[in-house]
Image (cartoon, rainbow, N blue to C red):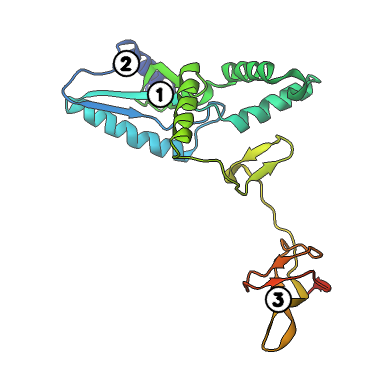
Amino acid sequence: MPKTYDPQEKEPELIEKWMSAGCYQRSKGVGDCTVVIPPPNVTGILHMGHALDDSIQDAYVRYSRMRGRSTRWILGTDHAGIATQTKVDKKLKEEGRSRLQMGRDAFIDACWDWTHEYGGTIVSQIKRMGCSIDFDDEKFTMSPEFSRAVRKVFCDWYHDGLIYRGKRIVNWCPHCRTAISDDEAEYHDEKGHLWYLRYPLVEPVDGAARSGRSLRIWVMPGSLCSWSPCSSRRAVRPTWWGPI
């Protein structure tokens, strides 16, 4: 018998025994308890937020099993579109190829190849944590059945008037040539200016025909017409502008 307990050696063996015995599959009982894991990125790795969230779910699932409820914790992973695309783009660049040259279908196949090769890390980490999740029936957001379901739901919502396409300010990536979320954008500070514009007013205020307002840089000097965020009055083409 070893002098000290070695979790690196014993815990993986114990988890495999539990899985082989079907302990993590749907348990028999009265009442239903089904939990779907918030799908982590298939090409990512676990962080403290994942560990906390999965620990809470695991405690609830085990508690429900012990109460005699029919319990199942469903495993799923997300395709992580931008992250996967970036990785595949770098690989194609090393091979002297481009996704724009190879076409959509071939690029999707390349993404699938990347997912199959590198996508098991985060699932292995969830298993190593000892989470009592059903590893025998893993789901993936790019699976054909889920892709069809997503397209159907969005089309139904659009035709029912529940969602619509509108103009929004987005983070546009000139390299990926697509919009990315706020947490995928890399921010850096730059020194800017507030601009002082002197322009004739269509409706003079207190007899004055000219006025000045402090404007953000997004009001383009030299435009035929502009609005001050401080005033609802419309102004014609400015005659002078400059930084403060």
Residue tagged 3: 213
**Nearer-the-camera pick, 38 or 63:** 38
Which of discs 1 and 2 lies nearer the camera? The answer is: 1
Report if residue 235 is visible in the image: yes
Residue at left offset 30%, top offset 17%? 25
Q: Residues within 10 Å of mark 1 (few under 14, many from 20)?
A: many
Comes first in the chain, label 2 or label 3: 2
Q: CA distance from mark 3 to mark 1?
A: 57 Å
Count of number-bearing discs: 3
Where is residue 66 drawn, in percent x and y? Answer: 19, 27
Residue at left offset 72%, top offset 63%? 219
Where is residue 121 drawn, in percent x and y? Answer: 53, 23
Q: Which mark is residue 198?
A: none
Residue tagged 1: 75
SS for dot 1: strand
**Nearer-the-camera pick, 36 or 162:** 162
The C terminus, quarter of image: bottom right
Q: Amino acid at mark 3?
A: Arg
Q: Amino acid at mark 1?
A: Leu
Where is residue 109 drawn, in percent x and y? Answer: 64, 15
Residue at left offset 81%, top offset 20%? 96
SS for dot 3: strand
Q: Which mark is residue 18?
A: 2
Comes first in the chain, label 1 or label 2: 2
Q: Is residue 22 left or right of residue 152?
A: left
- Asked whether the residues under the numbered discs 3 and 1 touch, taking CB atoms below 8 Å apart as contact, a structural biologist would say no
Q: CA distance from mark 1 to mark 2?
A: 16 Å
Q: Amino acid at mark 2?
A: Trp
236 versus 212 height, above or below: above
Which of discs 2 and 3 lies nearer the camera? The answer is: 3
Residue at left offset 22%, top offset 25%? 32
153 versus 213 height, above or below: above
